[in-house]
Amino acid sequence: MTPQALEREFDVIVIGAGAVGENVADRVVQGGLTAVVVEAELVGGECSYWACMPSKALLRSGTALHGAQTVPGAEEAVTRTLDAAAVLKRRDYFTANWQDDSQVKWLEDTGIELIRGRGRLTGQRAVEVAGLDGNTYQLTARHAVVLATGSTPNRPPIAGLAGLPVWGTREATSAKEIPERLAVLGGGVAGTELAQAFARLGAAVTLVARSGLLGSFPAEASELVAAGLRADGVEIRLNTATQSIRANDDGTFTLTLHDQASGGQTTATADKVLVSTGRHPALDGLGLESVGLGAQDGQPLEVATDSTGLVHGAPGEEPWLYAVGDAAGKNYFTHQGKYEARATGDAIAARAKGELQGAPPAWSRYAQTANQHAVPSVVFTDPELAAVGRTVEQAREDGYNASSVELPIQVSGSSLHSENYEGWAQLVVDEDRGVLLGATFAGPDVGELLHAATVAVVGEVPLERLWHAVPSYPTVSEVWLRLLEKYGL
């Protein structure tokens, strides 16, 4: 068929059909508007196929096996190591074998139209799509255009890296076989999780971090994770810069490493190299310059948004351009992006109906207030690391009269959970109001403690009232009582 130029109009155009884009579209449709999502790759996005789901599937089998190995009676029954092929097969199941049929059907059933192609702004409320079907679509939005394009990996300035067939997180989470030796560059969440996953699947793993491991968390918590990785045979080289990488004739890679403390230089050889050094908003090629929002002075392209996701500086008398999720550059978590999407979708629908004027009040259904106060996150290593809200240092930097209370997790529930359970917990308290500003837990299965802390932070539950929330016995949640007792209640 001859390619065509097709003109279409919708109430809302969403560029990006990942979890965040899907949620925005869903909320505006629930609000009575029409919506189209534009996507050049798989509907469902990074989390479904290359991030959250496959990485956790790779980790879970090893965590389950190790959990059994730490409990007498179960330990004696464990006679085998992980079956890597079976783990990869289970991973494939959770990615739907990288097919998006079910996600596309959900869009159809929800009343959301899908155009497969690459979209870019061409003016106010105007989007041009280079369709994968060869057609060009000229789309007009009556009310809003939403950028939900996610993020893309950073490429560190390492000599020799450009052009080498190294892994990013996508290649690691979709790997078809386990390399004999894997070098992981980056000590953040993705690098740490994947280092442990591949070590437990049989790879000899070296993790190289320019600074510390999981540096955004309290040291007591990240040290427990480091100990867990070392117990799995991961060689951890902290405060170490990767100066160069070269490909060898046999298909391996040689890394030249610089120890920033001693000044010494060493080398490491690996069959695969995973570069996991952070991400940045995927905004290039979206035509932001057409509405006066292009990058300036060689700075990375980014946008600034308000509490509803509205992009500051977009031209026009009425609000119309929004960014949510990783594209907004505030929080790189799927759950938080979906939260932003729900608030933004509701705000768009309310503005279209004249029900919302200006900025919404904090903590309303239209405002992303939790972004400033209560962002939860879990590192799915073994032991796990879970946190919400502010660390004590962040709280003080933000002007709070903050204190903290911390202790090892040593309660009846943890003793029953496994032999030699090691954990750590911290609460951050606003002394002026007597409420929680943040909490951190480290230890096996502590991710299940986090939502209680999130509720306490969001609800600003007074500590004197929180003391009456009695933890069941014997559970690891007993640590809440011990923390409050240590605080003085």
Image (cartoon, rainbow, N blue to C red):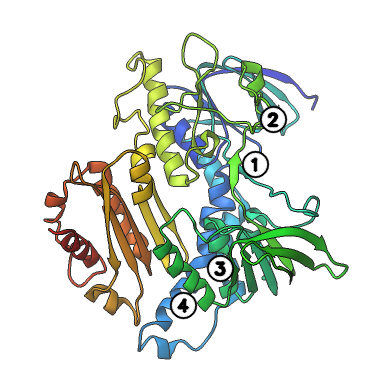
Q: Disc 4 versus disc 2: distance between alpha carbons?
A: 49 Å
Q: Which residue is mark 1?
A: 41
Q: Depth check: 361 or 463 in front?
A: 463
Q: Residues within 10 Å of mark 1 (few under 14, many from 20)?
A: some
Q: Amino acid at mark 4?
A: Leu
Q: Secondary structure at mark 3?
A: helix
Q: Amino acid at mark 1?
A: Glu
- The disc at residue 157 is none
Dot placed on the residue nearer the N-terminal end, 3 or 2? 3
Report the quarter where the N terminus lies.
Answer: top right
Label 2 to label 1: alpha-carbon separation: 28 Å
Q: Is residue 374 visible?
A: no
Q: Considering only order in the chain, which callout, 1 or 2, is on the residue closer to the N terminus?
A: 1
Foreground mark, 2 or 1, reads 2
**In front of the other: label 4 or label 1?**
4
Sooner in the amino-acid sequence: mark 3 or mark 4: 4
Image height check: is 59 above or below 457? Answer: below
Which residue is painted at 72% across and 34% down in the image? 132
Q: Is residue 231 left or right of residue 175?
A: left
Q: Residues within 10 Å of mark 2 (few under 14, many from 20)?
A: few
Q: Nearer the viewer, mark 4 or mark 2?
A: 2
Relative height, residue 22 to residue 358 (above, below): below
Secondary structure state at the residue bearing disc 2: loop
- Where residue 346 appears, as percent x and y from the top left, is 38, 27
Q: Which is closer to the viewer, label 1 or label 3?
A: 3
Would you say 199 lies left or right of 320 here?
right
Instruction: Name the amino acid type tagged 3.
Output: Ala
- Pointer 2: what residue? 298
Mark 4 and mark 2 lie on one chain; the one further toward the N terminus is: 4
Q: Amino acid at mark 2?
A: Gly
Q: In the image, which is nearer the foreground, mark 3 or mark 2?
A: 2
**Alpha carbons under labels 3 and 4: distance apart:** 12 Å
